[in-house]
Image (cartoon, rainbow, N blue to C red):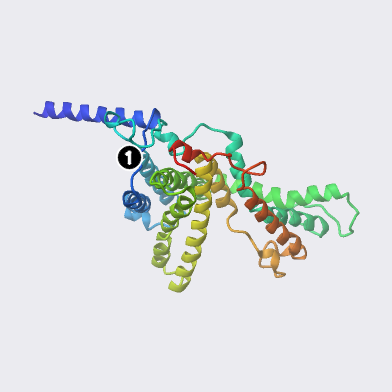
Amino acid sequence: FVVEGTSMTSATTEVLTTKLSHRLLTQCQHKHLPLRSTIPYCAAVSTCFVLCLYIFVPSTVRRLPRDDVRHIKWRLFAVFVFTTMSICVYPFIFCFDEEKVTGDDGGGNRFPALHIMGWSPFHPARDLLILLHVCCLYLGPFVASFLKIHVARKNVVMYDGFVTTTKRGSIPPAVGYIQATREVALLPLSNRLSNIQSDPALFWGIIRDLIVAPFAEEIVFRGMIVPALLSSHLSPTTTSWVSPLFFGTAHLHHAYLRLQSKLESTRIVWLTTLVQFSYTSLFGAYVSHAFLRTGSLVGVTLGHSFCNYWGLPNLGFLSKTDRSELSCVYGFRWIISVMYVIGMIIFGIGFRSGNWSFFPEESVLPSLLLMSE
């Protein structure tokens, strides 16, 4: 009986593995499930994504600071396990059994499930255009960073080998810009790279914030959720606004951690959480739209990583005080503000079809699912 049971288990495992590989890599006839099925699925995915950070991470490790190396590594492991499981489960929920498929079932599409989930062939130009589109929102910060170098060229700065003079014009402008760039940009970057090499916590923190977290979140909240909602006959626009609600909700557990730390008042924690939910939902709406238009996880991950690196705009240039590193460009506040507005205008124009669009003329994901736009 033991031998027979083992044989049956092996046969079942082999059948499931064959079906999984076929649907993931060869073809998946995607189901069009009703919203009453896909909404609970999306809620379960976002909830389990958060729970895995608690279930797979030992309680002794969870008590460590968030930036402790052991805590980071365990969280990366938990996210890896969950995303792998999610990718494997998706075809069994949303792909028809090959034996039961009829000519009118599903959308009639025959694309691999991985392709539908965003693992499409790499197109550098398409993916870099998403990154360039995101950069438009940071035109103001880019200009502020350059003006900071401009101010450093004109002012007296005498430390750490920065060569300049008190007499304006006594050194060539090009030399002044070179020295200012070295002082303002290159030396801090060099110091940061040295710190990364010597500080494991900083190194693993960057791996988490700029590589693993953006990629894993895009796999789960775009690759797992957006096709499911779209195949339920939601319009692309509605899908772009509904899917980020799960993304924003998944960040609410940060409030629980901050309340547990007792370092901030309850009012501040909930106010901060509300702001975080708002901008994560807005950002989620954008990357959901970009994913719908391009069908590429690579492009939206690049944009996600870029935003994680730059963070929210630094408005310190609006203040004369020395509390911000951008207070030195206060005199250029109107120029920087105009650049912010121009950047947002270009960003908005980039959604339109035509020569100025940053996206393909035909949205990729709806065409994969044979859905009308």
Q: Is residue 161 left or right of residue 189?
A: right
Q: Is residue 277 left or right of residue 181?
A: left
Q: Position of residue 209 (x, y in %)?
A: 51, 49
Q: Tag 1: Cα neighbours inside 10 Å, few (<14), some, or many (≥20)? A: few
Q: Is residue 256 left or right of residue 193?
A: left
Task: Looking at the picture, tell me which residue is in the foreground, 318 or 297.
Answer: 297
Q: Is residue 119 left or right of residue 136?
A: left
Which of the image's four quarters has the N terminus?
top left
- Residue 298: tell me if it is visible: yes
Residue drawn at the location 74% of the way across and 64% of the way down: 333
Task: Looking at the picture, tell me which residue is in the foreground, 344 or 188.
Answer: 344
- Residue 158: tell me if it is visible: no
Q: Position of residue 132 (x, y in %)?
A: 63, 44
Q: Position of residue 269 (x, y in %)?
A: 46, 68
Say if 107 sits above or below 314 in the image.
above
Say if 15 sits above or below 39 in the image.
above
Q: Which residue type carries mark 1?
A: Val
Report the residue that reaches farthest toward the front.
Answer: 104
Q: Which image quadrant is residue 165 in?
A: bottom right
Residue drawn at the location 79% of the way across and 49% of the way down: 179
Residue drawn at the location 71% of the way across and 61% of the way down: 337
Residue indicated by mark 1: 89
The number of callouts visible is: 1
Say if 41 sits above or below 330 in the image.
above
